[in-house]
Amino acid sequence: MDTLNSLADGFAIAITWQNIGLALLGCLLGTIMGALPGLGPSNGVAILIPLAFTLGLGATPSLILLTSVYYGAMYGGRISSILLNIPGDEPAMMTCLDGYPMAQKGMAGQALSISGIASFVGSFFATWGLIFLAPQLVKIALLFGPAEYFALFALAFATLGGVSSTNQAKSAFAAALGLGLAMIGVDTQTGVPRFTFGEVHLYDGIDFLVAIVGLFALSEVFIFLEHRHGNADASAKKVVIGRLTPPWSMIKRCTPTMLRTSFLGFLAGVLPGAGASLGSFISYSMEKKLVDKEGTFGTGDPRGVAAPEAGNNAAAGGALVPMLALGVPGSGTTAVLLAVLLSLNITPGPLLFSQNPDVVWGLIAALFIANFMLLALNIPMVGIFTRVLMVPPRILMPVVAMVSFVGIYGISGSTFDLLVMVGFGIGGWVLRKLDVPLVPIILGTLLGNAMESNLRRAITIDNGNWGTLIDSPLAIGLWSIAIIGFILPLIVGKVVKRGMRAGRDTAKDDENSLVD
């Protein structure tokens, strides 16, 4: 009952003209960002962070805007997958398998509508899961001491490569690089500058937002400058949307699929390091084994569109659970949102629900509002969103660069931060060419200082005894999960990647046969 009362208070906070307007703006911008191939939720949120801060928004409005962008980008990723057979991001890859064949049959509008309904069901289920599961995790987290928190942060780094990763060495390198960046600045315990090289601007450390915008947004601009691809509109004009509203029989047939895969996706999102990609893959694979008796999956079965869309959107909501309750992001996009919270002097974790209830419950209420907005926008306005695919990157990328530079300068007023952002952009471009994940770098920069202070505190309390790090059942459990989470991708990651790649190849083969 207390939970429902808190949710009601959250709606009282969220339902203002400003917050509803920000949610609508976030949904529109997020859907556009998601629809553009290659950007995805992480880049979309990173690009729009400067906008939230330059508008001078408070904590709750900023989070409402950016989480609406997050949910909108998860919705939008399906548009290019269905129409062009080009996933907007990795979680939307499985949507290509049946979405594009449906489009080739003249059912693009119905495929887009079914995917929109499935995204709504997945997000709606995940938001309720967040409401009931996060407070329970908070009760467990209140038992944590410094040693347990250090083990929790180690678990976050160990699982950050994700189950879909096969190169844990690169993930470990990226995490070490992030921790090294976190060491820059004045040591909070001794007051001695570290790795500042005499540069006064580095005494306060590296700004999270500068690093994020450089690594995600600006590196995307450099990737474009390298490849100069501008023909994304060539195929979009050939697709006929057709009827938008799917028949009732199709919705009825897909409903059990949506419910089952929403549950699977939410579990994948809550698990550290799993994320929306695994949620999408598991949902599609399980549903295919369960209901595909006639072998119609991969040929344009609507259930093959509903399954991955419900799964990846439920996983997106599930990833918010560990971020809000434990202060540990469950995905790349929630790592970016974690940086926003820290920049607003709000510390996610067990005390968030008691110290900043207006922020957390206002955010949860706004997720419901944004979800209904996205359902209302995405079906009647599909034709408008598909036109976004015709915007050439040569126009889009200068806009991204302009927003990045103007936004960061508006936040800090420092030309030094602009130079640091450019440095991170170049570094992000190089790392992406080497296939090194960027999210562990961000997480290391965010959590490095907290990890160090908890390690020092735990050792000091136990008079220099390092055994205190494995001295409690809770710490041992966290270390065990961390070790399993680091080793598991080496065992099952290849299978997951192979399945996703095989599905992608199948979709390409189908496209080629249709062209022939």
Image (tube, grey):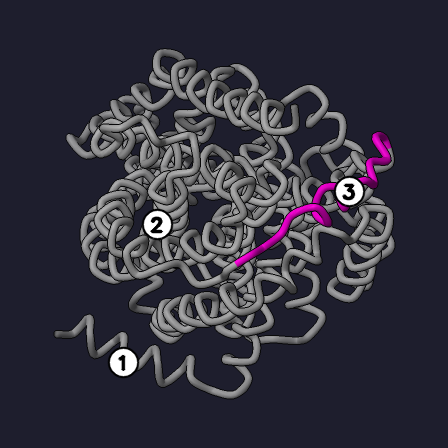
Q: Is residue 327 left or right of residue 82?
A: left
State the residue lying farthest toward the bottom.
17
Q: Residues within 10 Å of mark 3 (few under 14, many from 20)?
A: few
Give x and y (percent) for residue 225: 86, 36
Q: In the rendered image of this protein, does residue 141 appear above or below residue 229? A: below
Front residue of this view, candidates 502 and 345 = 502
Q: Give the number of the disc on residue 234.
A: 3
Occupied quadrant, residue 117: bottom left
| Residue situated furthest left in the rendering | 1
- For mark 2, what is the residue? 314
Which part of the image, by quadrant, shows the N terminus? bottom left
Residue 55, visible in the rendered structure = yes
Name which residue lies at 32% across and 53% down.
Answer: 250
- Which type of secondary structure does the marked residue at label 1 adopt? helix
Mark 2 Cα shell of 10 Å, populated few (<14), some (14-19), many (≥20): many
Amino acid type, mark 3: Ala
User: Mark 3 or mark 1: which comes first in sequence?
Assistant: 1
| Foreground residue among 271 and 304 | 304
